[in-house]
Image: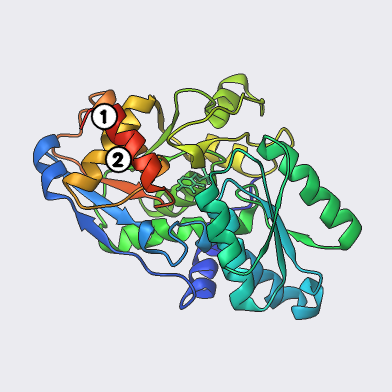
């Protein structure tokens, strides 16, 4: 049981209102023409922290404060994250008056680390993988009584991300398909529950990296498996789903209809196209929907399709790397 329900997502929408941006869904003229479809872009890049992760985090901290009071979170909150989640926890904790320590692996790009520190949270750098950073988080929880805010594997987190699904339905009630970057599965799972509740026929498509697609490998295996963490333009999609996954594995298994993997070259091309043609500045993880349409020549003719531009945590250096890889 994953515990993510439409009622929880509706409660999340009420909780996060005013703290999180209600983002626009815009039509891409160039992509709509190219694919002979209605291609819509959900601009999560406009969140104050540059990524959708704020939705889940604000929902979880607010729900805990609502249920147990400010005193219960007096020791603070902590997490390990590939960047956008850490930034969201730092931002939300500061706004809600709760102390925060963010544990990051040495794989996380420096621009993301600096952004978190600028938000006033303490950053602790540990090891070379997200799992090692999680070890430090566990220690802070056990020894200092801090509260873990997980990046995806929690029903309050996934319900917060699911508010994107409610907004999609408000703006495009006749949507046919959504393409969502898939890593831990909070984003895809939450959106999936929200959309399937009123449109079960709507196709939920997950897109992962070609190497290290932990959720998809786990679904094929029938249980959570570990994958190797590799450097990627889509670094926000790296990392495992946790061998003791208690929520999002079941959630994604229930709501995902189709899945694609995308190469580094395809991610690079999609990042450059979104910037050049649509003037949307996105990180690699946010470009994977377009990368999948391009690389796998998906036939979406005549359909209304939403791409979730999930975040903009990318340095100019990385963007330049993408540009060279794309040959533009
Ligand atoms: C975290 C993240 C994702 C994937 O979300 P999950 O809930 O882990 O599947 C996609 N895009 C960006 C920009 C992210 O930060």
Instruction: Name the residue rendered at 83%, 56% in the picture.
Output: 141
Mark linked to residue 271? 2
Query: Few, some or many C-alpha atoms within 10 Å of disc 1 (few <14, some 14-19, many ≥20)?
Result: some
**Location of residue 181 (image quadrant):** top left
Q: Which part of the image, by quadrant, shows the N terminus?
A: top right
Tell whether 7 sits left or right of 167: right
- Which residue occupies 57% across, 26% down? 219
The disc placed on residue 94 is none
The image quadrant of residue 273 is top left
Q: Quadrant of residue 210?
A: top left
Q: What element carries label 1?
A: helix
Camera-side residue of 114 and 156: 114
Residue 223 x %, y %: 66, 26
Residue at x 34% of width, y 48% of height: 282
The residue under label 1 is 326
**Residue, far top:** 221
Task: State yes or no: discs 2 and 1 in contact (Cβ < 8 Å).
Answer: yes
Q: Which of marks 2 and 1 is nearer the N terminus?
A: 2
Q: Return the x and y of residue 183 as percentages of the image width and height.
A: 52, 38
- Distance from disc 2 to disc 1, alpha carbons, whole Å, reads 9 Å
Label 1 CB less than 8 angstroms from ligand 1: no
In the image, what residue occupies the spot 38% across and 24% down?
263
Q: Which of marks 2 and 1 is in front?
A: 1
């Amino acid at each position: 049981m994953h515990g993510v329900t439409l009622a929880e997502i509706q409660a999340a929408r009420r909780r996060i209102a005013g703290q999180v941006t209600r983002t626009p869904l815009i039509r891409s003229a160039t992509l709509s023409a190219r694919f002979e479809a209605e291609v819509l872009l959900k601009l999560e890049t406009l969140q104050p922290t540059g990524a959708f992760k704020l939705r889940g985090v604000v929902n979880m901290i607010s729900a805990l404060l609502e249920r147990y009071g400010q005193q219960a979170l007096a020791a603070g909150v902590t997490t390990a994250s590939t960047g956008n989640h850490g930034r969201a926890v730092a931002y939300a904790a500061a706004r809600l008056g709760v102390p925060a320590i963010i544990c990051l692996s040495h794989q996380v790009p420096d621009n993301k680390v600096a952004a978190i520190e600028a938000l006033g949270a303490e950053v602790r750098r540990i090891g070379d993988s997200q799992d090692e950073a999680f070890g430090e988080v566990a220690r802070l929880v056990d020894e200092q009584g801090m509260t873990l805010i997980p990046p995806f594997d929690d029903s309050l987190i996934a319900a917060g991300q699911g508010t994107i699904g409610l907004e999609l339905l408000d703006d495009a009630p006749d949507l046919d398909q959504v393409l969502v970057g898939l890593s831990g599965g909070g984003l895809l799972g939450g959106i999936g529950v929200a959309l399937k509740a009123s449109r079960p026929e709507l196709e939920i498509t997950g897109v992962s990296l070609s190497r290290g697609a932990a959720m998809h490998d786990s679904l094929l295996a029938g249980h959570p498996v570990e994958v190797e963490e590799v450097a990627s333009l889509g670094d926000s999609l790296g990392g495992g789903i946790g061998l003791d996954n208690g929520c999002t594995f079941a959630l994604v298994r229930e709501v995902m209809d189709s899945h694609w993997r995308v190469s580094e070259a395809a991610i690079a091309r999609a990042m450059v196209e979104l910037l050049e043609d649509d003037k949307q500045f996105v990180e690699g993880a946010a470009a994977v929907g377009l990368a999948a349409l391009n690389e796998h020549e998906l036939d979406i003719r005549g359909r209304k399709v939403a791409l979730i531009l999930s975040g903009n945590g990318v340095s100019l250096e990385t963007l330049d790397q993408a540009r060279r890889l794309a040959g533009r």
